Each structure stands twice: as C-alpha cells, then as structure tokens.
Image (spheres, rainbow, N blue to C red):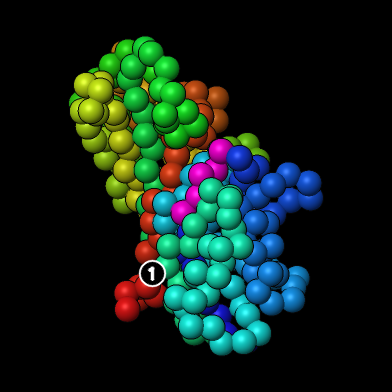
Amino acid sequence: MPRYALKVEYDGGPYAGWQRQDGPATVQGAIEAALARLEPGPHTIAAAGRTDAGVHGLGQVAQADLAKAWEPFRLAEALNYHLKPAPIAIVACARVADDWHARFSANERRYLFRLVARRAPLPFERGQVWKVNQPLDAAAMQAGADLLVGHHDFTTFRSSICQADSPVKTLDELTVETVTRPDGYPEYRFHVRARSFLHNQVRSFVGTLERVGAGAWPPERVGEALAARERKACGPVAPPQGLYLAAVKYPSDPFAD
C-alpha cells in the first residue's frame, strides 16, 4: 500500500484535539472521513504529534496508507475538496517510503505560542491567541526562558496525565519575540523547539513565563521551579488557543521536491 505524508493546517477551535475519539469531532477523524470518500475505509492515519483541544496546526504532519497510487497533488486536492467546509487544509502531500513514519521518523518539533497584550477584546482573533490586559516584560521572560533550555528533568512542567516514559527531555530553544501589531499593541511570540515534548509542557512554560513578564515572579524563580521537579511548583498553565504546532522536521524533508 503506498504511503503518503500530509502536511496539515487546522484551526483547533472546533475540535476536541487531533486524536480520534468516540463522539466529539477531531482533526484526525475529519481527515479519515475525507479519505474514506476517496477509497473504502476504514482509514487510520498517524501524526507527528497529538495536539489538544483548541490547539492549532500550522505544520502538522500525518501519514496515510492508500490502496492505489495517487499523484500527490491530486490526492491533496481531493482531500481538500472533501474536507470542506472544515477549517482543515492539506497544504502539501508527498509519496514516502513504506518504513517512513510521521511520528517516529521526526527529529524535531517546533511550537509557536502567541500572546497579545490588549485590554479590548480581539474580535478577529478570538480563539487564535491568548489575550492579557497589560504589557509584559519580554527581557525578564527571556531571562526565565533561558533557564529552561538544555537537558533537564521537566517534571514541574509536565501534566499529571502525561504518558511519556520519562520526564527528561532536551529543550533546544525557547525564544521570546516581541512584535508590534498593526493595532499598535505588543504580541509576544514564544518559539519553542525540541525533538519531543511532554504533555502540556509548552503551555506550562508560557503560563509560568507570563507570571515573570507580569512581575509576579522574578526570572530566577523559573529555575527554582525546574529544580523542584514538582508539578505544584509550576505557574498557571496557559490556555490552548494561543498554541500552534508550527513545524515538524525530518532528516530528509519529504516535501522538499
């Protein structure tokens, strides 16, 4: 059965996360239903990461095995047709080797978290960013973020329901970027990069760093929280709507051609 890699964008707002469930709508379920319109199912696809309810995808990658050989462009077009009007798009498609795996072949995942400081509501970006009322100290947040980069036991920043075998991970990047928006207000973009992540790890980072930016925590308290290796030492967990799975990297980019 030919295997295809799919690069997927989606608005996670209407969905109970990526992973198929009985009852609630999910991104995986929507794509599998679209595949069933092309070839008899059932279809089971695998993804590079299982995003939670409300989390978005800019560069999610999934794999699908089909009975016949499709020209990748035609497969993407057909899936997009059958996905309408869902807020899901197949932005690239490629034929890959039978032993290629969207999750296990990946060697890096990149997340983006968007946080906007503005008192007024955001009618055009509802569900797309986390809004706080007051500007934050980006330099202080970066000082706290720097304490998290490297190889650590991240128990403090791990959800209590995380199923990972070990809390030890290597965080390659946690950069805080400040962007002045067209409306004049600041947007803080957290760029996070690692081979793999624990459940709620990025949202735990951002929620903790927001406390630093707001002046409620000194930056060094982030290091103390990390060293505590206790979930109760973590700051508040940021809401899901500001989080995006931005990109998944492989030793050889399946979409390069």
Residue at the (39%, 75%) spot, across then down: 254
How many marks the image carries: the answer is: 1
Viewport quadrant of the C terminus: bottom left
According to the image, label 1 marks what residue? 250
Residue 102: % across, % down: 51, 68
Residue 122: % across, % down: 41, 22
Q: Secondary structure at mark 1?
A: loop
Task: Please state which of residues 206 and 185 is positioned toward the viewer in this rendering.
Answer: 185
Residue at the (68%, 57%) spot, across then down: 29
Residue at the (49%, 31%) spot, across then down: 127
Residue 130: % across, % down: 43, 27
Going by the numbered disc 1, the residue's amino acid type is: Tyr
Q: Is residue 64 visible?
A: yes
Q: Residue furthest right?
A: 22
The reply to whether the magenta stretch includes residue 252 is no
Q: Is residue 50 left or right of residue 181?
A: right
Viewport quadrant of the N terminus: bottom right
Task: Please state which of residues 101 and 232 is positioned toward the viewer in this rendering.
Answer: 101
Specify start and end residues of the magenta stretch as a single range: 9-13
Q: Quadrant of residue 82?
A: bottom right
Q: Is residue 191 left or right of residue 239?
A: left
Task: Please state which of residues 214 and 134 is positioned toward the viewer in this rendering.
Answer: 134
Task: Please state which of residues 221 and 76 is positioned toward the viewer in this rendering.
Answer: 76
Residue at the (46%, 54%) spot, across then down: 9
Residue 170: % across, % down: 38, 52
- Against 177, is 84 above or below? below
Q: Quadrant of residue 255?
A: bottom left
